[in-house]
Amino acid sequence: MGAVGLHINGLHKAFGGFKALDGVSLTVNPGELVCLLGPSGCGKTTLLRCLAGLERQDQGQIHFGERDVSTLPPQARDYGIVFQSYALFPNLSVAANVAYGLAGQGRKATRERVAHMLELVGLAGSEAKYPGQLSGGQQQRVALARALAPNPTVLLLDEPMSALDAQVRERLCGELRQLQRQLGITTLMVTHHQDEAMLMADRIAVIHQGRVEQYGAAEQLYRQPASAFVAGFLGQGNWLPFERDGTQARVGGLSLTLAAPPAHARGQLFCRPETVAVNPPVHEANLCSARPKGLTFLGNRCRLAFELDNLPGHTLHAELSAEATRRLGEGPLWVALPPHHLQVFA
């Protein structure tokens, strides 16, 4: 069976007076990996549980391909799922765990399928081991093999990397993404780690207070955030309070040029630290004198904290290469805030 898409239309879910989902609509293309990204309590796990039939939505429809699964029980929906805790059976061997969803396929077919799945996840030869004998990363692979063994049309992942340390998590993210592409299975993954989402996803849905705040490719969300929440949640950023000054934005004693005149009388200007030009070799727009406040070493780059002379008490950041850091010297500090990188939020 080829990959199918996933269609969510107007999902609402409340627990008492709390709205966990507030009209969520989302389309996942066949074979696509989409991450649901957001802080704790934003509704992303509730959405996943509604897709799995473990919670019943109050309103809205769910389609796996052409099938309306909105009211079907979990066992009739045809998906595989990996939980945050992996939920392996500790008293069953690795082989028995993977074979759990293969009832009725015959002993030989089951044995061959189990061996194939364990080979896919890099655990060939581990059939006789028990979960307690495996590392966290190996248990995650067994849970993934069990979810994929019945050849489901959709794969659901509920923060599958959260129990792993950073180095193992990064390696397994790459391996899982490669396997997902190889199998071509439509996948929806819940995470609160932005690096995880950016590393793995074709598209990311940022969830905030039960709603989809923005949905798109990682680069689009990072470079063109649709709201102040998305801008602040994804990566680092600088915020500058402004008031409209004709076609410019007044920040403290400065008038800054923007790519377009501000539509709001006041609000916040936002820019990423890496877009700030420090001691540019030629004069640039929005060049400001500044005072350094500190330098943080981040391996392949450094983060400079500074204050604008015309906006004391308001710390901003710029990211510099090691070479640019060496050129800082002892002289005056000038920073430029490029107009096309300044975004306006009301």
Image (tube, grey):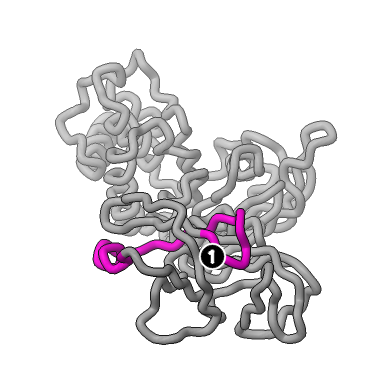
Q: Looking at the rendering, which quadrant does residue 202 occupy?
A: bottom left
Residue bounds of the magenta highlight: 307-329
Taking depth in this image into account, of 170 and 46 the one nearest to the observer is 170
Is the C terminus in the top left, top right, bottom left or bottom right quadrant?
bottom right
Report if residue 69 lies within the magenta region: no
| Residue at the outermost top position | 91
Q: Position of residue 168 (x, y in %)?
A: 28, 38
Q: Is residue 30 visible?
A: no
Q: Secondary structure at mark 1?
A: helix
Horizontal side of 67 relative to 102 (left or right) equals: right
**Which residue is rendered at x = 54% and y = 67% of the image?**
271
Taking depth in this image into account, of 293 and 120 the one nearest to the observer is 293
**Which residue is rendered at x = 57% and y = 57% of the image?**
205
Q: Is residue 117 visible?
A: yes
**Which residue is rendered at x = 30% and y = 21% of the image?**
131
Q: Disc count in the image?
A: 1
Q: What amino acid type is highlighted by mark number 1?
A: Leu
> Is 123 placed above or below 255 here?
above
Horizontal side of 35 relative to 58 (left or right) equals: left
Is the N terminus in the top left, top right, bottom left or bottom right quadrant?
bottom left
Q: Which residue is mark 1?
A: 221
> Is 117 placed above or below 292 here?
above
Report if residue 320 lies within the magenta region: yes
| Residue at the outermost front position | 331
Horizontal side of 282 relative to 322 (left or right) equals: right
Horizontal side of 267 relative to 80 (left or right) equals: right
Taking depth in this image into account, of 64 and 194 the one nearest to the observer is 194
Q: Looking at the rendering, which quadrant does residue 146 occupy?
A: top left
Taking depth in this image into account, of 254 and 318 the one nearest to the observer is 254
Q: Residues within 10 Å of mark 1 (few under 14, many from 20)?
A: many
**Which residue is rendered at x = 35% and y = 82% of the image?**
281
| Residue at the outermost left position | 125
